[in-house]
Image: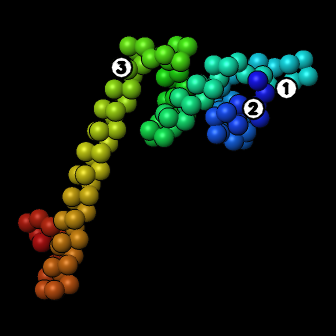
């Protein structure tokens, strides 16, 4: 199928499909005149790419994962890689929660400073 048909069947713009190609997420065959042609399996492939993007994965990570989705089917390796990615995200969430908590502390100290005029520095010198 041609790129316009793939776009229509997946709800993804032609521009996005070309981007996927640039990122090596999608590899079309080319006719002698240079037109892109996609196999039927490209529909499921594009849908999976969209799902992975929607899950917050980068194109680099998706490229690394695609060999583990063989013929549109998950493999144990894909599940392992996705689980590792989830663990990475969970770690990042924990870091952000810690950052938010430290910022809350700074805000609390600054608010006390406004009310009392005392230094908002934390620690033995504050």
Please tell me which residue lies in front, 30 or 9.
9
Q: Are marks 2 and 1 in contact (CB under 8 Å)?
A: no
Disc 3 to disc 1, how far (Cα)?
37 Å
- Residue 74 in view of the camera: yes
Question: Which residue: 13% across, 86% down?
Answer: 116
Q: Could you say which is closer to the camera, residue 113 or residue 82?
A: 82
Tell me: 73 left or right of 32. left
Give the residue pinned by disc 2: 5
For mark 1, what is the residue? 35
Q: Of the residues under marks 2 and 1, which one precedes in the sequence?
A: 2
Looking at the image, residue 57 sits to the left or right of residue 32; the answer is: left
| Left or right of 115 in this view: 66 | right
> Gap between marks 2 and 3, in whole Å?
33 Å
The answer to whether residue 22 is seen in the rendering is no
Callout 3 crowding tier (Cα within 10 Å): few <14, some 14–19, many ≥20: few
CB contact under 8 Å: marks 2 and 3: no
Residue 30: % across, % down: 81, 20
Left or right for 16, reference 53? right
Q: Quarter of the image containing the N terminus?
A: top right
| Residue nearer the viewer, 56 or 45 | 45
| Residue 94 location, quadrant | top left
Residue 80, which numbered label? 3
Task: Using the image, determine if residue 35 lies above or below residue 90.
Answer: above
Q: Under tag 2, what secondary structure?
A: helix
């Amino acid at each position: 199928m041609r790129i316009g048909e793939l776009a229509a069947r997946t709800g993804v713009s032609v521009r996005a499909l070309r981007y996927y190609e640039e990122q090596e997420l999608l590899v079309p065959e080319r006719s002698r005149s240079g037109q892109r042609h996609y196999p039927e399996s490209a529909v499921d492939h594009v849908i999976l790419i969209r799902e992975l993007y929607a899950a917050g994965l980068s194109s680099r990570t998706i490229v690394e994962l695609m060999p583990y989705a063989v013929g549109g089917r998950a493999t144990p390796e894909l599940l392992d890689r996705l689980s590792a990615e989830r663990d990475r995200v969970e770690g990042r969430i924990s870091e952000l929660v810690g950052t938010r908590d430290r910022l809350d502390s700074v805000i609390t100290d600054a608010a006390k400073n406004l009310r009392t005029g005392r230094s908002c520095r934390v620690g033995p010198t504050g």
